[in-house]
Image (cartoon, rainbow, N blue to C red):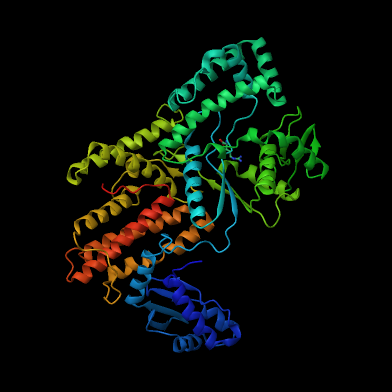
Amino acid sequence: MASVTSLTSAVHQRLANALTAALPERADADPLLRRSDRADFQANGILALAKKAKANPRELAAQVVERVVTGDVIQDIEVSGPGFLNITVTDRAIVENLAARAEDPAGRLGVPHAEHPGTTVIDYAQPNVAKEMHVGHLRSAVIGDAVVQLLEFTGENVIRRHHIGDWGTQFGMLIQYLDEHPHELDHKAGEVSGEEAMSNLDRLYKAARKLFDSDEEFKTRARRRVVDLQAGDPHTLAMWQKFVDESKIYFFSVFEKLDMEIRDPDIVGESGYNDMLAETCRLLEESGVAVRSEGALCVFFDDVKGPDGKPVPLIVQKSDGGYGYAATDLSAIRDRVFNLKADSLLYVVDARQSLHFKMVFETARRAGWLGDDVKAHQLAFGTVLGKDGKPFKTREGETVKLEDLLDEAVERATAVVREKAEKVGLSEEEIVENGRYVGIGAVKYADLSTSAVRDYKFDLDQMVSLNGDTSVYLQYAYARIQSILRKAGEARPVAHPELALAPAERALGLQLDRFGETVLEVAASYEPHKLAAYLYQLATLLTTFYDQCPVLKADTAEQVENRLFLVDLTARTLHQGMALLGIRTPERL
Ligand SMILES: NC(=[NH2+])NCCC[C@H](N)C(=O)O
């Protein structure tokens, strides 16, 4: 458990004790402590308690104030309004608390582990084989990666699953074509770049399509291939594997550009559940959860109807015997619950698939695969829009190539970095590396700083802007602190709890104290945008602090040390917080 307690918990403890003393019959009552603008904290729980105890809220509040221990943590406590408590903490408590965070032996800045960690299987970064990735795949990867980092940081056992689209009828056509033109993918992994891999696939796809549409005999052969593939014919499988391998070269190049670690064994695509599909259907049919309707195996829902008022079923098996997307997802649930022993299933998938997941989860519940002890949640995300507010497309109306987009972000960011490079004394190598971290960070941050369910505008100009809620702003805040620490010479960051704090120091200190609770909240609610908001506010408070409190030119040596201590902890918090979002913080910028 946590070796460092936050100010919030210290204040909470003292209030709870005083409440118990004032109202012994309600010993477990929660004072409902909140951060507040009026004082450091506000407790709002007295009102409801007084109502239940049929007491006067202001009087009960006054009794709590009388009994609360003050002096060490709580500086001031007073009744306000109808029975709120406004609480100010001592400067000493702030600095002592932060010092404990800074010295946290676990190197976690005092962030506790979650109280009840479990096993989460997270389904994210799931592009499709032999197809170009699009911005939706980018979102899933970026949001999913942040959630993985956050959950792992809180002690959760996280199992990653990249449910790639690697199965389906289109492969019959591709495999048949490759079989008839055997040398088209004749190279080993490592011999081609991601871009080449994609253009190989694109070329093959187009050629196969053309033949499929113009040559009846090829069409027949291609259709037979699908049957061979599903029957597990070894030669056909080997051809299929070539497409998967070629696609992975491409996927990995995009993920690497994104500065994101995706591990091959975590890629378990639709094909990985092939052996389970028949059994899944059998179980559903035998239990009566699914029924045959016009030959297809279907699950019906009272509340899912089409525009004509007719029920729209979840089709698990088509009338021709083929299995669909739903059969795979239902099989994946069985695997994740029964084999991987998940207690949470998380899906980072486009909101346009929400109905699919709603029906899949409900079906799994009816089948008894998802019990009350297993949570299933789709972390649905919105659409990426262009500057014009319409779905993101090139000027010619085509979907934007992901790699081009990332390259452009890096290019713009490099220009921004270069402008200041001379002043900072960056080498060409550092400019290139920083440009990458700033550019990729900008793309990730723009995505992660808005609530996932909302659509967001992809606007590179705004993303790499130095002012406003951008990753560059946060990266500069970090680098600026590093520059101060380098200039500090002999002076070291040392906490001095005996010093009185200026308002800007207090505000910064109180924000630093919130880091642990913010991380836990954000991980529990899968809302990385709240961590982004926290970090942005931290950087803003740092800016105010600089304006009001000279660091190296402070009045006394102790004050210099104490301020160095504050900015150093701010830097470490920014670094850790950004890392949880998958964003780097260069030392010099
Ligand atoms: N278990 C799942 N269905 N995961 C989502 C897969 C996303 C799908 N491959 C797509 O490109 O839209």
Indicate the position of residue 564 as horizontal and vertical percent values: 25, 63
Relative to residue 39, is residue 577 depicted above or below? Answer: above
Relative to residue 248, is residue 555 depicted above or below? Answer: below
> Can I make out residue 517 in this image?
yes
Q: Nearer the viewer, residue 292 or 113?
A: 113
User: Within the displayed image, which quadrant is ligand 1 positioned in?
Assistant: top right
Indicate the position of residue 359 as horizontal and vertical percent values: 68, 45
Horizontal relation, residue 416 to residue 311: left or right: left
Query: At x 24% / y 67%, what residue is drawn?
Result: 561
Query: At x 51% / y 56%, what residue is drawn?
Result: 523
> Can I make out residue 54 in this image?
no
Indicate the position of residue 369 as horizontal and vertical percent values: 72, 49
Query: At x 46% / y 59%, what residue is drawn?
Result: 519
Horizontal relation, residue 424 to residue 403: left or right: left
Relative to residue 83, is residue 564 depicted above or below? Answer: above
Q: Nearer the viewer, residue 340 or 74?
A: 340
Query: At x 43% / y 45%, what residue is drawn?
Result: 447
Q: Nearer the viewer, residue 375 or 113?
A: 113
